[in-house]
Amino acid sequence: MHLDPGTVAIIQLAWSRLLGLDDGALGDGGSDRLYSTDDDASLLTFVTLFGREVLRGPAWAVEAGRDLSGPELRSASTLLTLSRGHGGRALGEAQLYFCDALPQFDEPPAVVSSEAALVRALERRCPPDDVAEADLGGVEHPFVLVDGSDGSGDTAEAQPTPLAGAGYDIWEGILAHIAAITPPEERRKGYAGRVAAVAVEEAMAAGLVPQWRARTDNTASQRTARRAGFVYAGTQTSVAFDRR
């Protein structure tokens, strides 16, 4: 599975802007590592995308990282070392995925809702760390997969059961950054893929390129991304620190 060259160019444009580079910086055909300095930044970020490397942060951190290799900079512990003395806090190591084709599933159409009450009900069923990472309640466009059999009777008070959720925020007017969350007891049932497909379809209908970010230690999220048609494109490692 591959991304269309036009899609790749759009992703490179969006990430060039996100990283404070010229619009064509990531698509110029070069192979050297790129550096972006921002002395007001509260993040030190190392990104690899389609084989290109970018280190972005305050000048003191960027200079300290110039002589380090890509594998070293992909490690959160390395970035923490570079930000020692500045209150560095690891935000994690993640993989980046993108897609430009609609997911294909054999199951019946998903029954979804964007009601805030269902988003909150879903989050109550999930571990706090998962809730914080996905932040489904904070995304612009949330979708909750519900049990279609619930709430279909005559009892007005009956509420559907939230099974999984996905949604997206819009980055640079170009990317739809997808987030997904599933309660532990509902995992490995295909629910995450089904609701993610809804988010992807809605994003693509809006003219956006869907993006999926999964922690390197979250194999379930990586598996869901691939099953939904996402293609691995790179990595992102970040630490936050106190601005001085």
Image: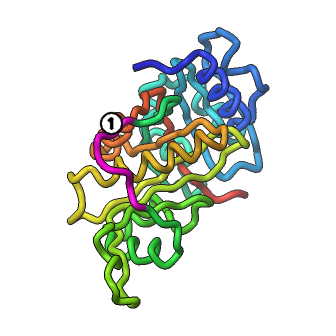
Q: Is 110 covered by the magenta stretch?
A: yes
Residue visible at 45% across and 59% down? Answer: 133
Q: Badge 1 local density, few (<14 within 10 Å), some, or many (20+)?
A: some
Residue visible at 59% across and 35% down? Answer: 209
| Principal secondary structure, stretch drawn in magenta | loop
* 157 on left or right of 4: left
* 63 on left or right of 96: right
Residue 149, position as x, y percentages in the image = 28, 70
Question: As displayed, is residue 192 above or below residue 115?
Answer: above
| Quadrant including the C terminus | bottom right
Q: Residue 171: which quarter of the image? A: top right
Q: Which residue is mark 1?
A: 227
Residue 73 seen in this snapshot: no
Residue 28, position as x, y percentages in the image = 70, 12
Q: Residue 106: which quarter of the image? A: top left
Question: As displayed, is residue 16 above or below residue 225?
Answer: above
Q: Nearer the viewer, residue 215 or 55?
A: 215
